[in-house]
């Protein structure tokens, strides 16, 4: 078992940028425990986690009020002490504030970037977008509007167009860097 202090890495980015790929690589390749905002939202409201339309609708309602802080409190409760955690799907500056408040110097944010057309091509078969306009409509819903505010808060911005091997290499390098930054 590692004696390194636990690290919490939040992963943000627009739809189809590769954020879930990054979070799952942290889980699979680096032993992090995987958490996802949409799964916590689904659990909280008893929604089928595959019902993206309903999740978007409820997510917009949660963001409109103080619900975003409650969602974060629920998420944070699951991240126990001593656990390296990858938190997928930050969508709002409140998410950043809550995770940073809870984990301090052990919290790092990765913002995953990819061009709009690249993201559309990834998502057209996965989510059934027939046209680029359908993708843009989804990408500009209320739950997606605050994501760009996370970019300047990110510890690191990474390209979501790298190969899996390149991403793993970069994540290993970043993890070493993050561990060196932690106040022990």
Image: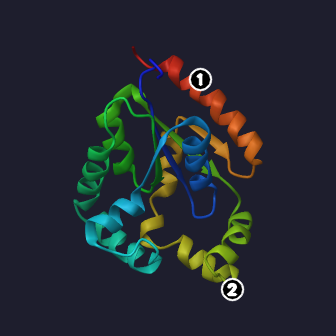
Disc 2 and disc 1: Cα gap in Å? 41 Å
Q: Contact (CB < 8 A) between labels 2 and 1?
A: no
Task: Pick out the residue farthest to the front.
Answer: 1
Q: Nearer the viewer, mark 2 or mark 1?
A: 1
Q: Secondary structure at mark 1?
A: helix
Task: Pick out the residue farthest to the bottom.
Answer: 130
Q: Residue at x 61, y 82 (%)?
A: 134
The circle on residue 115 is none
**Where does residue 171 sit, x and y in percent of width and height?**
64, 35
Above or below, 132 against 173 in this view is: below
Quarter of the image where one finds residue 146:
bottom left
**Where does residue 36 sit, x and y in percent of width and height?**
43, 55
Of 141 and 128, nearer the camera is 128
Q: Is 55 displayed left or right of 15 in the figure?
A: left
Which image quarter is the C terminus in?
Answer: top left
**Where does residue 81 sit, x and y in percent of width and height?**
31, 31
Pointer 2 residue: 130
Name which of mark 2 and mark 1 comes first in the sequence: 2
Q: Is 44 displayed left or right of 139 in the figure?
A: left
Of 76 and 30, nearer the camera is 30
Above or below, 52 against 7 in this view is: below
Quarter of the image where one finds residue 53:
bottom left
Q: Secondary structure at mark 2?
A: loop
How crowded is the residue under tag 2: few (<14 C-alpha within 10 Å), some, or many (20+)? few
Of 181 and 22, nearer the camera is 22
- Colour scheme of the rendered structure: rainbow
Q: Residue at x 74, y 52 (%)?
A: 161
Pointer 1 residue: 176
Q: Is 159 displayed left or right of 143 in the figure?
A: right
């Amino acid at each position: 078992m590692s004696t390194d202090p636990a690290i919490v890495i939040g992963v943000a980015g627009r739809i189809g940028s590769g954020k879930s790929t990054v979070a799952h690589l942290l889980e699979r390749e680096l032993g992090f425990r995987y958490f996802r905002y949409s799964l916590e939202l689904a659990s909280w409201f008893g929604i089928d986690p595959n019902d993206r339309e309903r999740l978007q609708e409820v997510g917009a309602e949660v963001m409109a009020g103080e619900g975003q802080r409650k969602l974060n409190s629920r998420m944070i409760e699951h991240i126990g002490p001593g656990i390296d955690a990858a938190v997928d799907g930050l969508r709002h500056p409140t998410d950043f504030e809550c995770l940073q408040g809870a984990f301090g110097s052990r919290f790092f944010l990765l913002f995953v970037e990819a061009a709009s057309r690249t993201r559309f091509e990834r998502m057209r078969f996965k989510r059934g977008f027939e046209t680029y306009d359908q993708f843009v409509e989804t990408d500009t819903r209320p739950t997606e509007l605050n994501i760009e505010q996370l970019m300047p808060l990110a510890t690191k911005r990474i390209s979501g167009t790298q190969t899996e091997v390149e991403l793993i290499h970069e994540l290993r390098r970043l993890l070493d860097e993050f561990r060196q930054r932690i106040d022990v």
